[in-house]
Image (cartoon, grey):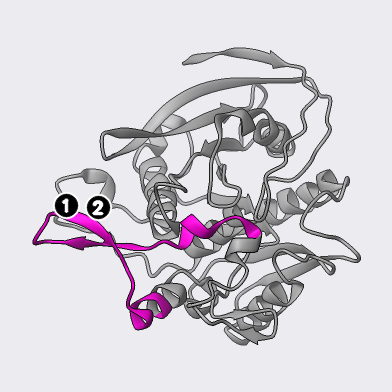
């Protein structure tokens, strides 16, 4: 769908555990909106919204992952549109990408979808009037984890794929995100026991970790129960173990009193980035929990500054 929209809203969104955080906002935003199908999965369309600034465009793109608790709801779109306002005002084209998630799909599925969205946008860069070499990504909580997973991916396009989208790079050039979980093998200062699913029951995201694998005999997906395999998947979806020296600049904002995703997750992640000489920074919200800061706009301006600096 296309059109010019004026939105006025009063919105409160709360999702338990890893979540999209409470926000009350009244705003008036004018932008051009286009709904796009960036892929298909099991007969379902993977969609995103392209928000184009009505003023001067800078020819650069920011992907905003619509994900809370590895779950996506269409009702969240006004919230993410509001958050995109800072980027739109600076001329960025913003893509609100909706990855698949629980309870049907798990974290590896969401990561694959996020990567797919980058490739799709890059492949169609000329259509969207953006530079394919200037794409940033952002998200909060699980959206932050997916952002970091994309950023630290080894990026292996398939030159022989029948789908031309899969032949292009899935790399992003900069990242800025809020309170992302980044290490599922160590939660806080504790080593994780996968049998206990650590905080998953408490955080209400259990189904995001119900990993499945293909059974060639019965031609269906079955639950992974082997503990060694589960630990291997935990490591594979933990961005901290995927860091390499060619990763893009990364900015993280995190609260010191976050009881959902421990602050130490981001501290250790940034420390490892520094050891790899990757441009990075940690914005510390003293006393901040898992969102609900009431001054997110200030941090979003810092995110925009980060993208301005590294998406030159």
Magenta stretch bounds? 203-231
Q: Residue at x 48, y 57 (%)?
A: 208
Q: Residue at x 59, y 62 (%)?
A: 201
Work out how far the residue at label 2 is from the one at label 1, CA to CA, in angstroms. Answer: 6 Å
* Left or right side of 14 for 157: left
Q: Position of residue 107 (x, y in %)?
A: 45, 58
Q: Quadrant of residue 92?
A: top right
Q: Position of residue 254 (x, y in %)?
A: 77, 64
Q: Judging from the image, what secondary structure is the residue with disc 2 in?
A: helix
* Left or right side of 144 for 286: right
Q: Is residue 244 visible?
A: no
* Left or right side of 205 for 255: right
| Circle 2 residue | 167
Q: Are marks 2 and 1 in contact (CB under 8 Å)?
A: yes
* Left or right side of 197 for 283: right
| Circle 1 residue | 161
């Amino acid at each position: 769908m296309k059109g010019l929209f004026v939105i006025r809203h009063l919105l409160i969104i709360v999702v338990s555990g890893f979540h999209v955080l409470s926000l009350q906002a009244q705003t008036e935003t004018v932008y051009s909106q286009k709904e796009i199908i960036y892929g298909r999965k099991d007969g379902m369309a993977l969609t995103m919204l392209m928000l184009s600034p009505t003023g001067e465009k800078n020819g650069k793109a920011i992907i905003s992952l619509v994900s809370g608790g590895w779950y996506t709801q269409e009702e969240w779109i006004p919230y993410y549109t509001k958050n995109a306002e800072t980027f739109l005002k600076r001329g960025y084209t913003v893509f609100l990408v909706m990855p698949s998630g629980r309870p049907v799909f798990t974290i590896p599925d969401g990561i694959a979808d996020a990567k797919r969205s980058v490739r799709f946008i890059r492949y169609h860069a000329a259509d969207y009037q953006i530079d394919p070499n200037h794409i940033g990504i952002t998200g909060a909580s699980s959206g932050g984890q997916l952002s970091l997973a994309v950023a630290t991916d080894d990026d292996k396009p398939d030159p022989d794929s029948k789908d031309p989208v899969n032949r292009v790079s899935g790399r992003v050039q900069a990242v800025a995100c809020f309170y992302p979980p980044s290490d599922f093998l160590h939660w806080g200062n504790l080593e994780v026991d996968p049998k206990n699913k650590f905080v998953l029951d408490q955080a209400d995201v259990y189904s995001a970790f119900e990993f499945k694998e293909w059974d060639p005999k019965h031609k269906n997906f079955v639950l992974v129960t082997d503990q060694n395999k589960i630990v291997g998947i935990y490591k594979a979806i933990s961005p901290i173990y995927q860091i390499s020296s060619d990763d893009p600049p990364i900015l993280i904002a995190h609260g010191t009193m976050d009881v959902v995703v421990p602050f130490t997750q981001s501290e250790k992640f940034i420390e490892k980035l520094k050891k790899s000489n990757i441009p990075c920074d940690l914005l510390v919200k003293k006393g901040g929990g898992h969102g609900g800061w009431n001054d997110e706009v200030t941090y979003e301006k810092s995110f925009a500054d980060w993208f301005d600096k590294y998406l030159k």
